[in-house]
Amino acid sequence: MARKLVDDAADFVDASRTDRDARITAHFDHPQRGAMPATLRVEAGSHAFIGDDAANAFNPIRDKRDPGFLIVGYGIGRRLPKPGEVAIASDPVFDRVEGLFDSHHKMLGVDFFEALRQKGEDLGLRYAETLGRVLLTIDEQGNRLLPWLASFERRGNAGIDGMRKLLESRRLVLDVGRAEPLKLPPHLLSQGYQSTFAWVADLLGHAFLDAGHAVEPAEMTGIVLLDEVDLHLHPRWQRALVPLLRKIFPRMQFVVTTHSPLVLTGFEAHEIIRLDMVDGTVVQTTFEQEPGMQTGTELMAAYFGVPTAARPELEADQERQLELLAQDGRSDVEEAELEAIEKKLQPYLASTELWDLPSPDDLVVDDSDETGEDE
């Protein structure tokens, strides 16, 4: 990916700069079809890129459904299906991305275990073993994709057998600090837990299905489109998610959206693009400063345009308070207003670090003391 993208996408297509159409053509070399052009054009007065009819030359390639071109997409409706609720779709290539456009789409998820086992007992068992390793991967700080998930070996003699039994029984074994592990069906866990379990299991299943054999997560290649990657996740979990995905799927390209500043700490600056709507046009903004060590306040201000997390009406009251404090010779009405605002803000400011800061009156310097002379 390029180090820096154009800050304003409209720079390419500003109708005020020219009245001429623009075309961008790329030529691809196909071993059987030879040179294949694909053209994007921008019509005068338009901010949109339009695919040329020549791009349809790629349709026969897509229609062949050849393996090795794995693209998987997940929208906001990702959830665990009921046992046996979903079967392998007649067109897996279409099914992989349908969830992006249909929030009610049902992914196969952990049911890939049974579906793959029908294609071959060994394939289903290898899927179970691989999924177990993925979910139990630990980063340097001890984080996992599914917090508190216990070792699957407790359910059998080996990881494969343990994960197989877990998937057959539809139970998760959680180590929450009790004498005995907690065993729960996934649908009783939080939505964030279910969602992450579902899409990770689904992604791995599609990789197995596409290849027709077992694949190692570290060797998987393709593109994952993931809407709201932080969906229903605890803030502590959000911070660890992206680094874990890098560790587990180092060769996969993830294109994700988020509204969480904590998720951004897992990215490098050149990987982040903010999209804004400006006069009806979507404009992209890139960043130079690295987010990895920024505070929550810095992240909110820089990436989301929210300089403070304060409640809007309280923020307005505080701004009015500062205006009144800066005035010389306040009227009785203004003094009463200031007193009312300070009384209203007192319990909120007492719970912040601002409460220990000196008041403006404490910052007044007595000039007579500086000379050491008495009047």
Image: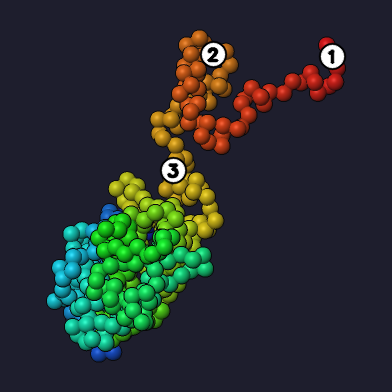
Q: Which residue is mark 3?
A: 306
Q: Is residue 106 left or right of residue 151?
A: left
First in residue order: circle 2 vs circle 3: 3
Residue at image position (84%, 21%) is 371
Looking at numbered disc 1 in the image, what kind of residue is underneath it? Asp
Q: Which label sits on residue 330?
A: 2
Please identify the quarter of the rendering in which residue 69 is found. Answer: bottom left
Image quarter in which the N terminus is found? bottom left
Looking at numbered disc 3 in the image, what kind of residue is underneath it? Val
Q: Is residue 70 visible?
A: no
**Which element is circle 3 on?**
loop
Above/below status of 304 relative to 68: above
Label 2 crowd (10 A; few <14 / some 14-19 / many >=20): few
Q: Is residue 345 visible?
A: yes
Q: Which residue is mark 1?
A: 374
Label 3 crowd (10 A; few <14 / some 14-19 / many >=20): few
